[in-house]
Amino acid sequence: MDDWRVYGPPDLPAPLSAALDAFTEHGYHGTTVRDIAGRAGLSVPGLYHHYPSKQSLLQGLCELTMAELLERSEAALAEGGDDPLARFDALVESLLRFHMCRRERAFVGSTEIRSMDPEYRTVYIGHRDRQQRMIDDAVADGVAAGIFTTAYPGDAARAIATMCVGVSTWYRPDGRYGPDELVVRNLHLARMLVGGPASV
């Protein structure tokens, strides 16, 4: 990945793009395969040729979402190098930008975990846990280095993850603040949660 901060238009196959729009508007259970097919410009049999079920559309969408999230997180951590504070800042910024720039995909993944087949839900939770471990480790490294003073690193890491994921539920491109300003504000809050330096 050339630059984890840069986002182009979502590069989704037409069936997944249509499913994303429908799931965002109506929820998984309120969406029909016929609706998705119509949005994708396909017949129902044509849609089934690519994705054999509505569940496979949800899974395909969530797999691409988590793959991009994890790739950007790893690139952000790599940019931070050996500096625990730089790694923490970059990871939190990456999570914030992802949940603003891919807010619909993040929202569907967060809200439709209840709609996933049990077998795939286990896979998805594994992806989510991998992301959480990155945050856990970043906070623990900061504590070990004496940069963060929180007595509750695990709780702080979970609170930061919740804050970043929650951005997808309220952020709007035409809102009062743009992504750069929201990164500054929320990174300040994240540092407060871990007892780190206040200025960003």
Image (cartoon, rainbow, N blue to C red):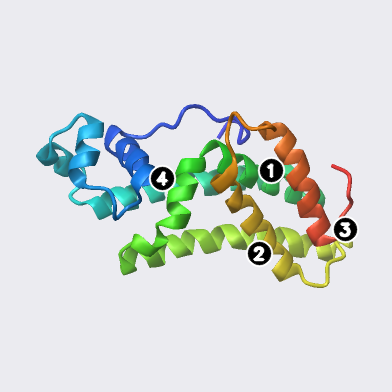
x and y percentages locating residue 123 in the rendered image: 40, 63
Q: Along the horizontal axis of the image, is 164 left or right of 71?
A: right
Q: Which residue is mark 2?
A: 158
Residue occupying image coordinates x 74% and y 51%: 88
The image quadrant that residue 99 belongs to is top right
**Is the C terminus in the top left, top right, bottom left or bottom right quadrant?**
top right
Q: Secondary structure at mark 3?
A: loop
- Asked if the residue at tag 3 contacts the one at tag 2, i.e. Cβ–Cβ closer than 8 Å, the answer is no
Q: Which residue is mark 4?
A: 64
**Is the N terminus in the top left, top right, bottom left or bottom right quadrant?**
top right
Q: Which residue is mark 3?
A: 147
Residue neighbourhood size for the residue with mark 4, other residues' Cα within 10 Å, grouped as few (<14), some (14–19), many (≥20): some
First along the sequence among labels 1 and 4: 4
Pair 3/1: label in front: 1
Task: Judge whether residue 183 can be spotted in this image.
Answer: yes
Task: Judge whether residue 86 can be spotted in this image.
Answer: no
Out of 35 and 194, give the one closest to the viewer: 35
First along the sequence among labels 2 and 3: 3
Q: Secondary structure at mark 1?
A: helix
Q: Residue 93 has which mark?
A: 1
At label 1, the amino acid type is Glu
Residue neighbourhood size for the residue with mark 1, other residues' Cα within 10 Å, grouped as few (<14), some (14–19), many (≥20): many
Q: Secondary structure at mark 2?
A: helix
Q: Secondary structure at mark 4?
A: helix
Q: CA distance from mark 4 to mark 3?
A: 35 Å
Q: Residue 153 has which mark?
A: none
Q: Along the horizontal axis of the image, is 77 left or right of 108?
A: right
Q: Along the horizontal axis of the image, is 171 left or right of 137?
A: left
Q: CA distance from mark 3 to mark 1?
A: 18 Å
First along the sequence among labels 2 and 1: 1
At label 2, the amino acid type is Arg
Q: CA distance from mark 2 to mark 3?
A: 18 Å
